[in-house]
Amino acid sequence: MEHVLIIVAIVVVVGGGGGAALVAPRLRSRRHPSSAVGQRETGTDGAVSTLEPPVGQTGTVAPPESGVPTEPPPARARPIERPPPSAGRMARLRGRLARSQSALGSVLLTLLSTGNLDEQAWEEIEDTLITADMGVGPARQIVEQLRTEVKVTGSRDPVEVRALLRADLLAQLGPDMDRTLHTKPHGDRPAVILVVGVNGTGKTTACGRLARALVGDGQTVLLGAADTFRAAAVDQLQTWGERVGAQVVRSDREGADPASVAFTAVNEGIERGIDTVIVDTAGRLHTKAGLMDELGKIKRVIEKHGTVDEVLLVLDATTGQNGLRQARVFAEVTNVTGIILTKLDGTAKGGIVIAVQRELGVPVKLVGLGEGPDDLAPFDPEVFVDAIVGD
Ligand code: GDP
């Protein structure tokens, strides 16, 4: 213990003297005039780090407990990118959705447009909806609704049938759910977004893309790499940050305390007048108790500074029931406020959007529609339904 403190003390003295060991960008600051750059900050464990970043450079800040500060990154090889704004992105990516989801729509429309809608045809429609991962309850509701409407209107006209199907699918998607992302700062404090989910779902990519989207919308962003057990994830996040000029708080020690990284990230966000802090968390935990402990601790230390504005759960749309099971566990251990559904481009089973919203009672806020850096879009139910049923 003693030697750890000595190392930390040396770091503080060296870092405080020259400021060369910690590199971070100076961003627009909302700080009070009394708070100077280079001011000392006390971390969760009482350790102190001093932050004196050079102007206009993206870089890294090590959290207090990490022992050895991260080396400054090499000189930037490429200029900072200017991502496009996020509005209307799902409409732009509609072609991707149509490619993956239109098979569902065309099967349904073909069945609905036949002159002979007998019991077997309705069963096939219900099966098609269930096969698209919609869940039995919503599939039954849609079929019952359609049956009534078709009986009342007596219509087999493809245009009318399409309109009925569109309306019923849309109703199941909860078009009135609030899908706003709460990313606006609170006075001097940044908004804080925790991103949670199992490894492999696209969590780190989602953090990076979300940072890009927010930068594209004109906000300043800081990324906290609290998934400290995966060096590759930390490096990946740093690359995302560097591309758009977002500062990254990371620890150079694998397995460092995630809560300490999260604490430092939010602290830095406050110090530098950042609008939104996005914290990537570990997804390797398979026991509920461990997950609860870790996410609970991260939340508690962040709440020393204020509130956690969003807990976004990342789910892989291609994993079906398995994804729903994961969703249930995360919802039990933390207060999920929104879902990021990734890889929707890679499955015809778009019904998972309806199933997961039902399961958790929270909206899908963002969807991943490809492997490109700007393929994360705010979820728009109308665009989604149009991609299924066509125009
Ligand atoms: P993590 O382990 O949950 O952090 O997952 P990563 O962020 O490393 O992503 C795992 C893989 O999924 C990477 O190859 C990503 O490019 C890919 N991926 C993430 N989101 C999407 C998406 O929306 N569509 C597709 N097709 N691939 C995605």
Image: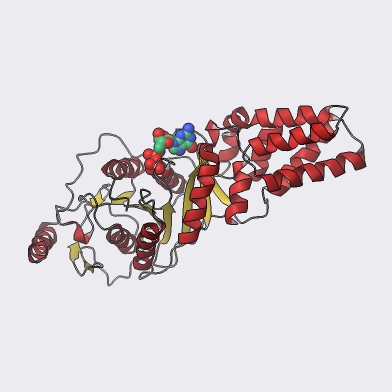
Depth order, front residue of 382/35: 382
Residue drawn at x 24%, y 55% as measured from the top left = 256
Query: In this rendering, does residue 96 appear at all?
Result: yes
Toward the viewer: 25 or 60?
60
* Residue 190 location (% of width, % of height): 40, 62
The N terminus lies in quadrant: bottom left
**Quadrant of image for the C terminus:** top right
Q: Nearer the viewer, residue 41 or 350?
A: 350
- 82 in relation to 189, above or below: above
In the rendered image, residue 128, in percent from the top left (x then y), is placed at 69, 34
In-front residue for pair 174/41: 174
Q: Residue furthest bottom?
A: 34
Tell me, yes or no, if residue 373 can be seen here.
Answer: no
Give the image's coloring scheme: secondary structure
The number of numbered discs placed on residues in the rendered structure image is 0
Quadrant position of ligand 1: top left
Residue 156 place in picture, x, y as percent: 87, 31
Residue, x 24% and y 67% (percent of image)? 43
Which residue appears at 26% of the width and 43% of the height?
231
Spot occupied by residue 124 in the image (x, y as percentages of width and height): 75, 32
Residue 299 lies left or right of residue 9; in this view the side is right
In the rendered structure, the answer to whether residue 182 lies left or right of residue 46 reads right
